[in-house]
Image (tube, rainbow, N blue to C red):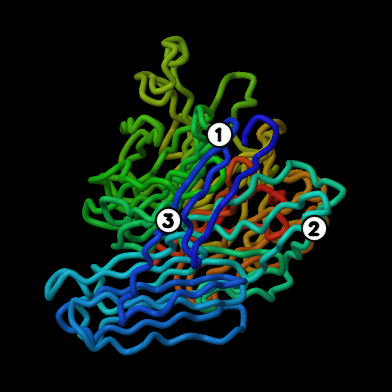
Amino acid sequence: CCGYGSGNYKVFSDGVKVASGGEFQTSETTTFGSCLQLTSNPTESPSVVCTEMAVVVKIITDDYPAETSWTLTNNCGGADITGPEHTDATTSYSNTYCLPPAEYTFVISDEYGDGICCGYGSGSYEVFSDGDSVANGGEFQTSETTSFGSCLQLTPNPTESPTPKVPSISPTTKAPSAPSTPSPTIKATYKPGDLTVRCDNNKLLLSTGLDCKLLTTGGQRVTFADGSRSSGNMHSRADGAAVIPHPTDNGWYYTSNSEASSGGGGVGTLRFASNGDLIGYERSLTGTTRNCGGGRTPWNTWVSCEEDGSSGRCHEVDPDTGYTQQVKVVAQGGNYESFAYDDQDPDGTRFFTTEDDSYGALTRYTPHPNAFLTGNSKDILNTNNGVYEYLVLDENDMTFTWSTSMTAGQASANALFPYSEGIDVHDRLLNFIAKTTRRLFTLDLLQKTWTKTSTYSGAFNLQPDQIARVIGEGDILYFCEDGGDACDIHGRDSTGKYFTIVRGDGYDTESTGLAFSPDGQFMYVAFQSNSNIYSFWRTDGLPFNGTVAETKYH
């Protein structure tokens, strides 16, 4: 590796990785083992050589070993394992299991509810899969859960040309980067709407050809691909989000709002490497309240909006530099929801913000021309003397205007589109949702005409030609639905066919924060109540083809 391919090697001894690499010159040498073989600890299992998947569970007990137990569940239908009893305090236990390749969920429990560290001893645990650490810790309360592996394990025949491996996205397994167009040797197995695959202890039901991994839980530290964990806890009540490309290394950021109240909101950012590995988490914005929606800017920052009455504002967040600022896209405080832009307007880039209020006007903000002359993109939304205009709809001839009168905009909103939320702009078409009237409004920004359709059977109950104007032929438009027991991910194609991509059977909350990685290999979505953010990928190694609809209503 890496001048003429991406070769690598791994050497295992009794199921433990002892050497690995790929980048060297003529040779590379590693020594392992000993001429003097020591007798193993009687509490440890004897050395086992596995021909399939070697899973090793190591436990160091605390002062109350009998309270500790663990299970290993085969999520693909195989046999489950219950760990042995622990009778000795402050003792190391190690057990090795030769298992068929599959997705497994490891759950460690403490009967008293204080974990195994650090109130009554310094216990710990670690789980290895084929020598790689996939779970570790000790500080928890009643239990801690980690999933690893995949239900579909492919092994290329060495005599055949290689095909993409299934990205299992366990903490130490890297997902391959699939080509942007299918190669003749790759067979697509993704069947949107064919719900057959269970994930995360049956909490989710996925379409055939998908797999998933739970990345975060609110109030807990985030575990990274190398097994380390974040210094701070994951934010609560994850909400609107977007993927922002990293400027230099082909990785990306997932910026996620927190809808926590009383100054506990803000933005948290997950950092991903170019292969999809989760490698970082930090709070990017703090001290704000009920950050619900937002949107990306043309220069790849995130605008996060507060739904906080007279105190609610919008804030720009740069996940790469850590820069944050309150921006001038709205004229006063309010219950602001979502943000979008139109960079095809011949009069310059315009910015739009919705407000979740009965008199919540839809604001169009045009920065002062000087804002674009400084050479600093951070000045575009934060320079004085920009122009605020408000949407006024005419029901008689189905046209619209932009008025400088906020009162006129509020009156139009109250009459026709109260409590507006999600907004999106594609190819001079602006779509936004009015929550209480359950209407999708579509503005043709070029012709200055508008239409409205019902959302009672889904936010995109549109005619096929309307769908095709938003997405390309053959693509899928992905969107989340309302909260409660309908916390699913749905799609519509350009022919008008509607289907469920992921069903949230184990959740009764809002699904939100839907976004794709820049290369299309990964799809992310959050389930709000537990701030559970998941990563989804196609097991055939191909990218998702589609567009995210930002017009979901809550």
State the residue in front, 103 or 346: 103
Q: Secondary structure at mark 3?
A: strand
Q: How many marks?
A: 3
Going by the image, does 464 lie left or right of 236?
Answer: right
Q: Label 3 neighbourhood size at 10 Å, few (<14), some (14-19), many (20+)?
A: many
- Rounded to the nearest angstrom, the CA distance separating label 3 from label 2 is 32 Å
Residue topped by disc 1: 24
Up-down relation of residue 307 to residue 352 (above or below) = below
Are the residues at dot 3 and dot 2 in contact (C-beta closer than 8 Å)?
no
Res 132 visible = yes
Looking at the image, tell me whether mark 3 or mark 2 is earlier in sequence order: 2
Indicate the amino acid at tag 3.
Asp
Looking at the image, tell me whether mark 3 or mark 1 is earlier in sequence order: 1
Going by the image, does 63 lie left or right of 426?
Answer: left
Q: Label 1 neighbourhood size at 10 Å, few (<14), some (14-19), many (20+)?
A: few
Residue topped by disc 2: 188
- Rounded to the nearest angstrom, the CA distance separating label 3 from label 1 is 45 Å
Indicate the amino acid at tag 2.
Ala
State which mark lies toward you, 2 or 1. Answer: 1
Query: Which residue is at a point 48% across and 58% down the rendered structure image?
Result: 17
Up-down relation of residue 470 to residue 96 (above or below) = above
Residue 342: x %, y % from top left: 59, 31
Residue topped by disc 3: 239
Residue sticking out furthest to the left: 120
State the residue in front, 348 or 53: 53
Query: Which residue is at a point 63% across and 24% down the rendered structure image?
Result: 345
